[in-house]
C-alpha cells in the first residue's frame, strides 16, 4: 500500500457529531445480549440455547439467521479498538468462545445458524444448484450470511488479537473449500448468481493473515465473471442490478490486489468505484433506488422514493479506504468525507441511536428508522459497524 492507515486503536474521537454517533452505537452494542444472537447457532449444533433468540431478519425460517451475530462480533471488536473500553473486548472474547463450542460440536468446521443449512450446502456440493438471485436451494443468501460470521472472526483476530478466532476462520474455509471442491467452473458461476456477500474478501484476508495461498485460490473461486469480466473491459453493466450484491465483490477485488497484485483485480475495482461515484451516486454519496442501480447520469427521475441504502454506503466506504491506501488521490478522500457526513452520519437518529435502512434524498420522504431490538435488518447490522469506524482511514 502507498498509504498506510493509522490503526483504529491509535485514534480517539474527542467530540462532535461523529463522537456522539459512536457513543450511541456503543450504548446500543452493550444493550444487546450475546446469548440471544447465539441461540440459533447452538440449536443447529444440537446444543441447548442459553437465551431466547432475537427475531426479525435474525429470526427462524427463511431469514438471514445468524447474520447479526457476525455483525455484532465485528462491531464489538471495532469498538474495542476505537475506544479501548474493556467491555467490548470481553464481549468479543465471549462470542468467540461460544461460537467455538458450536463449531467443535459440528466437528467439520461448519458454523451456521440458519435452518436447513446443511441440506442446502450438501446439494451445492453435489452440483444440485438452484437460485433466483437471492436464494440458494431455497435458503436466503447462505454464503452472504456465512460471510458475516467469517468477517466477525477476522475482525476479532485483527482488532482484539484473538488467535482462536483466526483458527476458527481457517476451519470454516476448509469446510467451504470441500463444498466447492468437485464443482465445475460453470456450476460455481451458477451458484454465484445468488448474493454471496464478501466471501472473496474474507478469504483474501485469511490468506493475508495466515500466508496460506490456498485461501487466495479459494477467494478466486468466488469471482463472479458475469459482473467482473465486464468491469475489467470498462463496461458499465450496473443499470438494473442489485446494488449491495455487487459492492462487496469489488471490496474483495481491491483486497486481493493489495495482497497479490493481480492487475485485473484493481482494474475492476477502480472502474467500478469510478462509475458508481461519478455516474450513479446522489450528491449525498448514496446510490440506487429500491436497492437497484439505475441508468448512469440520469437521477432526476429516480430521486424520490426509497433511495440510498445504508449497507451500500458502508461497503462503498470500505472500498474507498482500500483504494485510497493503494493510490492516495484526493478524490477518494473527498468521496469518503461526502458519504460519511451526508449519509452515514445521517443514518443514525441523534436522539435515540436508531439507524436507517435508507437515507432518502427525495421530497417529502421519511427515514426508515429500525426497531433496534426486533427488526435486525442488514442495515442494522452494518450500522453497528459503521459508527465504530468513524476514526478509520485517518
Image (cartoon, rainbow, N blue to C red):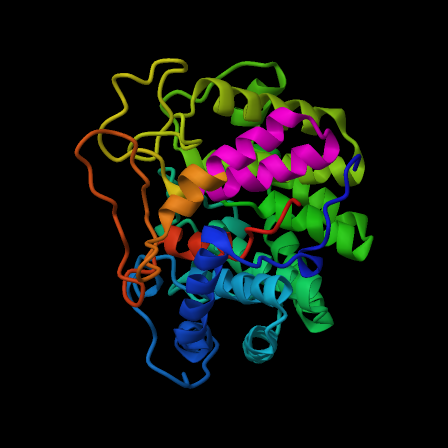
Residue 21: image location, x then y, percent: 44, 56
* Corner quadrant of residue 210: bottom right
Residue 161: image location, x then y, percent: 72, 69
Point 22% across, 32% down: residue: 305
| Residue 316 colored in magenta in the image | yes
- Secondary structure mostly seen in magenta is helix
Residue 207: image location, x then y, percent: 75, 50
Along the viewing direction, whichever of 275 and 246 lies nearer the viewer: 275
Magenta stretch bounds? 311-339
Q: Residue furthest right?
A: 211
Point 20% across, 42% down: residue: 366
**Number of marks in picture:** 0
Kindly tell me whether residue 58 is visible in this rendering: yes
Along the viewing direction, whichever of 229 and 256 lies nearer the viewer: 256
| Residue 63 colored in magenta in the image | no
Query: In the image, is 46 to the left or to the right of 150?
Result: left
Q: Residue furthest front?
A: 15
Query: In the image, is 164 to the left or to the right of 144?
Result: right
Kindly tell me whether residue 193 is visible in this rendering: no
Residue 123: image location, x then y, percent: 47, 52
Question: Where 128 sits versus 280, above or below?
Answer: below
Which quarter of the figure is the N terminus placed in? Answer: top right
Which quarter of the figure is the C terminus placed in? Answer: top right
Point 39% across, 52% down: residue: 378
Question: Where 48 sits versus 129, above or below?
Answer: below
Point 71% across, 59% down: residue: 10
* Corner quadrant of residue 274: top right
Query: In the image, is 254 to the left or to the right of 62?
Result: right
Amino acid at each position: 500500500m502507498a498509504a498506510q492507515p493509522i490503526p483504529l486503536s491509535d485514534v480517539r474521537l474527542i467530540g462532535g457529531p461523529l463522537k456522539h454517533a459512536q457513543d450511541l452505537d456503543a450504548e446500543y452494542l452493550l444493550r444487546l445480549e450475546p446469548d440471544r444472537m447465539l441461540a440459533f447457532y447452538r440449536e443447529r449444533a444440537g446444543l441447548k440455547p442459553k437465551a431466547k433468540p432475537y427475531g426479525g431478519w435474525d429470526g427462524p425460517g427463511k431469514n438471514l439467521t445468524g447474520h447479526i451475530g457476525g455483525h455484532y462480533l465485528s462491531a464489538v471488536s471495532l469498538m474495542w479498538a476505537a475506544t479501548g473500553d474493556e467491555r467490548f473486548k470481553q464481549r468479543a472474547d465471549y462470542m468467540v468462545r461460544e461460537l467455538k463450542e458450536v463449531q467443535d460440536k459440528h466437528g467439520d468446521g461448519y458454523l451456521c445458524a440458519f435452518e436447513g443449512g446443511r441440506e442446502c450446502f450438501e446439494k451445492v456440493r453435489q452440483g444440485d444448484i438452484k437460485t433466483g438471485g437471492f436464494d440458494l436451494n431455497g435458503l436466503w443468501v447462505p454464503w452472504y450470511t456465512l460471510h458475516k460470521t467469517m468477517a466477525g472472526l477476522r475482525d476479532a483476530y485483527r482488532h482484539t488479537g484473538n488467535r482462536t478466532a483466526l483458527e476458527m476462520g481457517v476451519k470454516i474455509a476448509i469446510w467451504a473449500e470441500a463444498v466447492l471442491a468437485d464443482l465445475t467452473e460453470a456450476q460455481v458461476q451458477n451458484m454465484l448468481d445468488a448474493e454471496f456477500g464478501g466471501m472473496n474478501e474474507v478469504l483474501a484476508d485469511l490468506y493475508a493473515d495466515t500466508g496460506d495461498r490456498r485461501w487466495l485460490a479459494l477467494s478466486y473461486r468466488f469471482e463472479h465473471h458475469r459482473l467482473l469480466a465486464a468491469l475489467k473491459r470498462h463496461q458499465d453493466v450496473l443499470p438494473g442490478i442489485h446494488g449491495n450484491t455487487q459492492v462487496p465483490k469489488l471490496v474483495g477485488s481491491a483486497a486481493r490486489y493489495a495482497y497479490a497484485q493481480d492487475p485485473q483485480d484493481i482494474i475492476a475495482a477502480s472502474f467500478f468505484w469510478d462509475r458508481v461515484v461519478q455516474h450513479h451516486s446522489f450528491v449525498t454519496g448514496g446510490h440506487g433506488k429500491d436497492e437497484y442501480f439505475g441508468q448512469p447520469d440520469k437521477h432526476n427521475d429516480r430521486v424520490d422514493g426509497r433511495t440510498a441504502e445504508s449497507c451500500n454506503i458502508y461497503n462503498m466506504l470500505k472500498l474507498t479506504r482500500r483504494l485510497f491506501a493503494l493510490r492516495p488521490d484526493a478524490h477518494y478522500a473527498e468521496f469518503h468525507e461526502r458519504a460519511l457526513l451526508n449519509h452515514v452520519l445521517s443514518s443514525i437518529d441523534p436522539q435515540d441511536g436508531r439507524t436507517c435502512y435508507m437515507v432518502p434524498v427525495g421530497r417529502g420522504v421519511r427515514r426508515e428508522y429500525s426497531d433496534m431490538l426486533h427488526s435486525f435488518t442488514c442495515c442494522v447490522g452494518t450500522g453497528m459497524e459503521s459508527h465504530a469506524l468513524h476514526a478509520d482511514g485517518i
